Image (spheres, grey):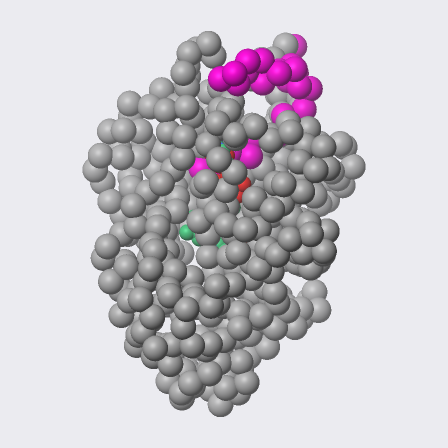
Amino acid sequence: MLVCEKGRVAGEQSGRNWGWVRQQGRSPIELPLMMESLRLWQGFTRELGEDIGFTQGGCLYLADNPKDFEAFGNWLPNASAVGLDTRLLSSRELSTVLKGDVSRWAGGMYTQSDGRAEPSRAVPGIARAASRAGARIVSNCAVRGIERAAGRTQAVVTEHGVVNASSVVCAGGAWTSLFCASLDIAVPQLRVKGTVARTAPAAVVLNGEAWCPHVAIRRRWDGGYTVAHGSALHHSLVPATLRFATKFFPAFMQEHGAIRLRIGRDFLQALKTPRRWPLDKESPFERERMLDPAPDEGVLAEMRAGLDRWFPEMGAPAFVESWGGMIESSPDVLPMLSPVAGLEGFFIATGFSGHGFGIGPGAGQLVADMVTNRASAAALAPFRLSRFFDGSPIRPGPTI
Ligand SMILES: Cc1cc2nc3c(=O)[nH]c(=O)nc-3n(C[C@H](O)[C@H](O)[C@H](O)COP(=O)(O)OP(=O)(O)OC[C@H]3O[C@@H](n4cnc5c(N)ncnc54)[C@H](O)[C@@H]3O)c2cc1C
């Protein structure tokens, strides 16, 4: 197996995320795959032989008013349908999992078996283990396109040469739609930017992760916290926004409180990006080796205020680093793990919509089964690309 990475492993989303390995709050459609992923995460530390920071410290959603607390209850049937240990905690019961004055909260939803891991350690660790098992991983190697014959995949054309391949998985994260467009394959996908920071080591307020609309925190292996805004994402309007507008409309309506729209340079930049290119010349993937968006200063200020207001027991630790991460999303906020009609041997694995770190191991297993013809049609059906084109209703799942 050959993995071509245009930049470096974990340079984009997989190394920039919050590190939540969460079952709680997911769509029932992907919940079984996520539970299988958690099982795989549990074995990783032993199998990889290195500390990837995985631990099951629990996931907590917090409500500061009774209405939001009550709304958490709507998700509980999804948990009980699959035997997941999610429960509601009253304001007083919160003290069993959260240190400090819990009376500021109306209550919470909690899943003790949920986990966390360190993206910057886990993903390179998994890549090293894959190499030891025989995979060849080549960094700074952009794939420019595919050679095909008689409707079949024949080879990938990389910036360093051509590699014969009868099966190709395009798992290009936020670049998948552009790559597929060059093959005349429509993949509805848009980008939103998240802003993240890490703190200096600070007092322990919980062992896992917690979310409320104002701020999201995750305990880190180094004694600090990874911090983000609970509900602030930026989307720069680009031609793809218009191209896929009808498909993304339901998701936009669901998330309009969190999405901050912008129009500016990105629109012109995207207009200038070719959608087809000669395979013997530099491609867009070599021109931008790594998506490294700047964190948003305004969002950082809101995160600072949110952290100090809602988790004062942490002792207001300084933000010692901050970064931006470009999240790619599908219209129903669920992954696309799918063969592509009309191009045999070509598959896509994308659309993880801001929660693909946790589900990665199970999704990877399912993709491997898909490529080797061992996946059942039932397992793949919810994740097929064609759901966006066959008239199926687009009902976005929850994003957090
Ligand atoms: C700020 C933020 C917070 C998040 N928080 C969480 C979380 O707490 N929990 C969770 O489960 N998920 C979270 N996610 C989502 C999660 O990180 C992603 O869903 C997941 O990492 C996607 O993995 P991927 O391999 O599909 O994409 P990526 O990690 O983006 O990898 C795709 C790779 O493909 C490479 N590539 C693209 N095109 C080419 C080409 N033509 N040739 C060669 N290489 C190419 C890119 O360089 C890139 O490295 C978050 C994401 C962000 C950005």
- Rendered location of residue 69, percent (x, y): 45, 78
376 or 39, which is in the foreground?
A: 39
115 or 269, which is in the foreground?
A: 115
- Rendered location of residue 8, percent (x, y): 48, 35
* Image height of 103 relative to 65, above or below: below
* Residue depicted at x 38% and y 76%: 314
- In this figure, what is the number of numbered marks? 0
- Rendered location of residue 232, percent (x, y): 33, 57
Answer with the quarter of the image where residue 130 lies.
top right
* Residue depicted at x 64% and y 29%: 136
The question of residue 164 being in magenta is answered with yes
- In this picture, residue 375 sits left or right of residue 256: right
* Residue depicted at x 40% and y 72%: 202
Q: Which residues are magenta?
A: 150-174
- Rendered location of residue 142, percent (x, y): 49, 24
Is residue 185 visible from the viewing direction of this image?
yes
Answer with the quarter of the image where residue 129 lies.
top right
Is residue 184 visible from the viewing direction of this image?
no
The question of residue 10 being in magenta is answered with no
* Image height of 371 relative to 160, above or below: below
* Residue depicted at x 64% and y 53%: 50
- In this picture, residue 268 sits left or right of residue 287: left
- In this picture, residue 122 sits left or right of residue 166: left
Looking at this view, name the residue that lies furthest to the right: 374
149 or 57, which is in the foreground?
A: 57
31 or 122, which is in the foreground?
A: 122
**Quadrant of image for the N terminus:** top right
